[in-house]
Image: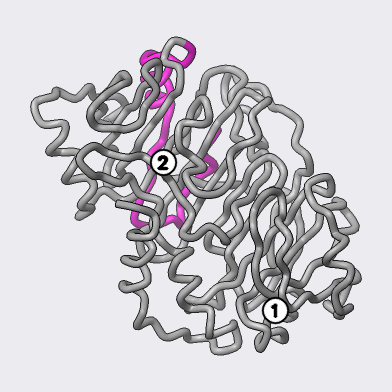
């Protein structure tokens, strides 16, 4: 399966959706449907583990996510300890959060509908505002903002194409971009921009929460979808020097440790796991069934020869754990992580907890 195949399948599934909130850019339905695709494990002749964005022009973003240390785990400094939020009482809601060490991204929906606009916040050193400042000044009820009807420069190495409203946040120095898909919907973009805030203590949540991880590991990349349907969570952890990858195949064997969790029940991918793991006796850890697969293996491709994968079935959750060096993060480490973990409901994100701690 390819990224475009996955996108087409998602668009077909969502083509008939009708937004309930007509004020939120109703003509962006197809782009929003692409963003709403599940970050699932993809099977072919061998399983390809690649958590991908729906299209190459959609921003991927983030910050260093860890706020509170787990046992034996130190906290590295963050660039700016904030998260994208919305003002209290906003008619919009955030469903998808993504992050790396220089930026963060959210998808903003009208409550109850399937449409979305994108909000991207970037560290000041990762953004050149020259093209934005040549745009039309626009009032958003606070900082000076500019509107560009057709914005094309790359932002932190990612193409952003379409109308943009942007401004500099006074408290953090970060640049914030509201990205739309139609020049006709400028008023709707202004409305979203007026509700956007940068605030502290925004935690990326997950259906699996680890009480212990190997020392010095911290979250450097996240992709969390708490929307209705099939919520999912993916996290990449590094030792401090890694920046997190961007764009298509961003999670593909580029960080020392990564994991993803999504719904197992009635998931065709899980049935493939059952087929591929037939005859292998699982180890039960903390009530979860686990299968440890050193690399290279025939279930996950490509896994580095020195890496390893672990398949986990916990309640209604399907979890994949992946390391690039099994001598540094060992099978015993993964077992200990799972032994310290609490598992939530992969069908409902309302009770999810921070992934670390």
How many numbered tags mark residues here?
A: 2
Q: Residue at x 51, y 23 (%)?
A: 213
| Depth order, front residue of 315/187 | 187
For residue 343, above or below residue 349: above
Please state the extent of the stretch shown in magenta in the rendering: 328-357
Q: Residue at x 40, y 29 (%)?
A: 322
Pointer 1 with pointer 2, Cβ within 8 A = no
For residue 22, above or below residue 223: below
Q: Residue 251 carries which label?
A: none
For residue 243, above or below residue 222: above
Q: Position of residue 26 (x, y in %)?
A: 53, 85
Residue carrying label 2: 260
Residue carrying label 1: 189
Which quadrant of the figure has residue 143?
Answer: bottom right
Q: Which residue is drawn at 53% across and 59% down?
A: 96
Which quadrant of the figure has residue 304?
Answer: top left
| Depth order, front residue of 288/124 | 124
**In the drawing, does residue 173 fall left or right of residue 274?**
right
**In the drawing, does residue 240 fall left or right of residue 347?**
right
Q: Position of residue 68 (x, y in %)?
A: 65, 33
Of tags 1 and 2, the one toward the viewer is 1
Q: Position of residue 37 (x, y in %)?
A: 40, 61
Question: Marks 1/2: CA distance?
Answer: 32 Å
For residue 272, above or below residue 167: above
Sequence-wise first label, 1 or 2: 1
Q: Residues within 10 Å of mark 1 (few under 14, many from 20)?
A: many
| Depth order, front residue of 191/61 | 61
| Depth order, front residue of 212/4 | 4
Q: How crowded is mark 2: few (under 14 residues within 10 Å), some or many (20 or more)?
A: many
The question of residue 352 being in magenta is answered with yes
Q: Residue at x 76, y 72 (%)?
A: 165
């Amino acid at each position: 399966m390819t990224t475009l195949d996955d996108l087409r399948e998602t668009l077909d599934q969502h083509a008939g959706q009708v937004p309930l909130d007509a004020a939120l850019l109703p003509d962006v339905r197809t782009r929003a449907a692409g963003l709403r695709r599940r970050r699932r494990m993809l099977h072919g002749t061998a399983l390809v583990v690649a958590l991908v964005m729906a299209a190459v022009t959609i921003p991927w973003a983030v910050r260093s996510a860890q706020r509170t240390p787990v046992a034996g785990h130190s906290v590295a400094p963050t660039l700016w300890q904030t998260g994208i939020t919305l003002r209290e009482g906003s008619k919009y809601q955030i469903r998808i959060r993504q992050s790396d060490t220089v930026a963060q991204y959210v998808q903003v929906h009208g409550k109850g509908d399937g449409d979305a606009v994108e909000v991207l916040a970037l560290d000041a050193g990762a953004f050149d505002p020259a093209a934005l400042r040549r745009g039309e000044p626009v009032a958003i009820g606070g900082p000076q903002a500019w509107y560009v009807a057709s914005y094309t420069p790359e932002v932190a190495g990612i193409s952003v194409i379409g109308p943009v409203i942007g401004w500099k946040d006074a408290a953090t120095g970060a640049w914030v971009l509201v990205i739309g898909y139609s020049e006709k919907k400028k008023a709707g973009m202004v409305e979203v921009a007026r509700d956007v805030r940068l605030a502290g203590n925004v935690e990326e949540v997950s259906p699996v929460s680890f009480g212990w991880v190997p020392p010095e590991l911290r979250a450097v990349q996240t992709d969390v979808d708490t929307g209705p349907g099939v919520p999912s969570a993916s996290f990449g952890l590094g030792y401090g020097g890694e920046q997190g990858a961007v764009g298509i195949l961003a999670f593909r064997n580029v960080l020392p440790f990564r994991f993803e969790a999504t719904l197992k029940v009635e998931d065709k991918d899980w049935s493939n796991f059952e087929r591929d793991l037939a005859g292998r006796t699982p180890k039960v850890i903390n009530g979860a069934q686990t299968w440890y697969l050193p690399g290279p293996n025939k279930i996950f491709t490509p896994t580095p020869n020195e890496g390893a994968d672990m398949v986990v079935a916990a309640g209604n959750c399907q979890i994949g754990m992946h390391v690039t060096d099994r001598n540094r993060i060992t099978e015993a480490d993964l077992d200990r992580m799972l032994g310290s973990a609490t598992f939530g409901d992969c069908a409902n994100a309302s009770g999810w907890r921070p992934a670390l701690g």
